[in-house]
Amino acid sequence: MIDVQGRGSDERLRRIEAVTDAALSQLDVSDLLEELLDRIREVLRVDTAAMLLLDVHAQQFVAVAVRGLEEEVRQGSRISVGRGFAGRIAREKQPVSLDDVTAGDDPILFDRGTRSLLGVPMFASGEVIGVLHVGCLRPHRFTADDVQLLQLAAERASLASRTQASSLDRTAALALQRSLLPTHLPNAPGVDMAARYVPGHDAGVGGDWYDVFTLPSGWLGVVIGDVTGHGLPSAVVMGRLRSALRAYALVCDDPAQALTLLDRKIHHFETGNLATVLYAMISPDRATMQMSLAGHLQPILATPGQPAATLNIPVDLPLGIGPHRAVRRRTEVAFPVGSVLICYTDGLVERRGEIIDVGIERLRSAVEPGPAETVCARLMAALATQQTTDDIALLAIHATDKATLEEA
């Protein structure tokens, strides 16, 4: 007597193993997706299989792997969200089975001869990131087991796609970090400088940045800033602001005016983003600084023989908030020989469960005049030991003996 039930169970197990096989993990993501589609076609006995991922910015589905479809819908084709069979699956966020496909269901697939379709959504953190669907060129009725199998395959594909996307984002973020954060600060007479950057997230870069550049007039531009948010999106905005501020610095001899122009750029081209920025210009003789703050934390100045002090500089509105023609002020500050200027972002001083003033006072108490590299190392050791989810940027500028200016 033939054990039909047992044979059916064996077949079901074989089908599940086909899409959960650990050997698939040994393939790179592109090969894994294509192999997965091949196995799905075999075990479901279908003619076509396609995987489409959502391009959030373009609001389109992009075909990343296909089997059994004509060239028009091969890899790289795009379908607007909300259209066709894929759009219906994404909208309903559940499996959709069509035993008799019509042109109204999906004109492209219908024109290619598809007569039955089964599709399931791909999820990440509860949101649809793509669609996996299969089709037959003849009428076919899909079963509950078919749906379950395709969902297993979609879960496998979602995990692989997220891993690949995470790896690409991390690679892009690190490349962006290397291109935007100075690996070496400029050699400027009359000062020595040091800086630190510590990302608060796995992406390796965020919206915090520092910059130092020599202007044609001999003034030294000093910048530290913080774009709201984290990771690659904030880093991209940060890069745009950094480049724009460098350009404005070439045509503005007033840091407040440069920040006004940068604020106009954010309102017009980076709508919805906010940033705090400190921009200072140190005079050619290194005796004074012109400084403007757009919502940023006041810097600390430590002068030999005196306690370190938080500079009493007016703090204007952050960039991207309020009227784009907000009044911005410039303040002149003395920069005595031997003193050290400390500019930083809030990740260095903020701690969960305490007001930020406590952290600023902790920083102020730790600052002592000295060579910039020594000061930076001491501050990071004293304040950056606790776990933080925010980026840290720190810039120290030490006013050296004016004899170095005469030698230069």
Image (tube, rainbow, N blue to C red):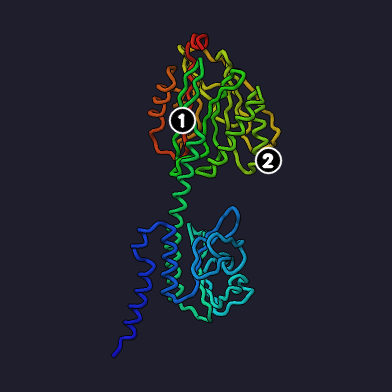
Residue 275 pos. (x, y %): 58, 36
Relative horizontal placement of residue 35, taking residue 93 as reference (left or right): left
Q: Mark 1 points at which residue?
A: 183
Q: Answer yes or no: do the residues labelled 1 and 2 have beta carbons within 8 Å? A: no
Image spot of residue 199 (x, y percent): 45, 38
Q: Identify the residue at horizontal 46%, vertical 57% (top origin).
A: 161
Q: Which residue occupies the foreground of this view, 274 or 107? A: 107
Dot label at residue 91: none
- Residue drawn at point x = 57 percent, y = 40 percent: 237
Task: Identify the residue at image location x=42%, y=74%.
Answer: 42
Q: Nearer the viewer, mark 1 or mark 2?
A: 1
Residue type at mark 2 is His
User: In this image, 325 relative to 42: left or right?
Assistant: right
Residue 318, above or below 64: above
Gap in angstroms between the C-alphas marked 1 and 2: 31 Å
Q: Residue type at mark 1: give it.
A: Thr
Find numbered disc 1 in the image and state the secondary structure of the residue it sits on.
loop
Give above or below for 204 relative to 10. above
Residue 268 shows which numbered tag? 2
